[in-house]
Amino acid sequence: MQKFDKLTGVAAPLDILNIDTDMIIPKQFLKTIKRSGLGKNLFDEMRYARDGSELPGFVLNKAPYRQAEILVAGDNFGCGSSREHAPWALLDFGIRCVISTSFADIFYNNCFKNGILPIVVSADERDALLADAADIENPELSIDLVSQTIRRPNGVTISFEVDAFRKKCLLEGLDDIGLTMEKSSAIDSFEAARSQSQPWL
């Protein structure tokens, strides 16, 4: 998993309540088990018309938001079904951080396991960040996971909370497999000892 420590990038304003996982990546794109290739279908029904042409009014179809790495979103982001394809699609598009006032629990957990930082802020802070992101002349935000701060274009910083264990995993790029592999020496020793003491297993 890609490490996350600091990120300065374009923030896209997506001021919509209750964005569910079917809006993030519709069900017809769930046939794959690959983590790559889903970015082109992120927010598919909002980005494209039925003939496949782009809808010019959608934020990710506009400059400079085509290169967005951060989303500032409405309340209850990632609700709906528990599909892990939702963070896969965000990450494949290039989104490394989502900022909202609240997240659905399963989506929130899946973000950390895929190298995306979900940040919870207050409603007033979210509104200020939405305004920053809406400024097409300078929509960049800077995220520092070590200091747990968001730096706005005007220099003001916003602090956020994150679980210490999840923070460590992001900083070190450790998903569930990576965490297990950190114990590989202990696992190898256990298996060797068991083979000696219980060779019939």
Image (cartoon, rainbow, N blue to C red):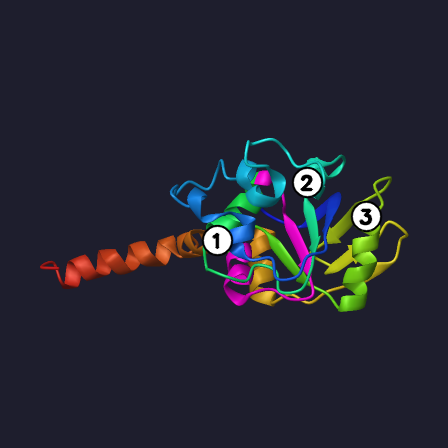
Q: Which residue is mark 1?
A: 175
Which sits earlier in the primary sequence, circle 2 or circle 3? 2
Q: Residues within 10 Å of mark 1 (few under 14, many from 20)?
A: some
Nearer to us of marks 3 and 1 is 3
Location of the C terminus (image quadrant):
bottom left
Q: Secondary structure at mark 2?
A: helix
Q: Residue furthest right?
A: 154
Location of mark 3 (residue) = 134
Camera-side residue of 131 and 9: 131
Is 59 positioned to the left or the right of 134 in the image?
left
- In the image, 53 versus 178, the foreground residue is 53
Which amino acid type is marked by label 3?
Answer: Ala
In this view, 133 is above or below 76: above
Q: To which quarter of the image does residue 75 belong?
A: bottom right
Contact flag, marks 3 and 1 (Cβ < 8 Å): no
Q: Image point 45% across, 55% down: which residue?
A: 83
Give the residue pinned by disc 2: 60
For the residue marked with disc 2, what is the amino acid?
Leu
Q: Position of residue 35 (x, y in %)?
A: 46, 42
- Callout 2 touching callout 3 (CB < 8 Å): no
Quote the CA–CA distance across marks 2 and 3.
Answer: 12 Å
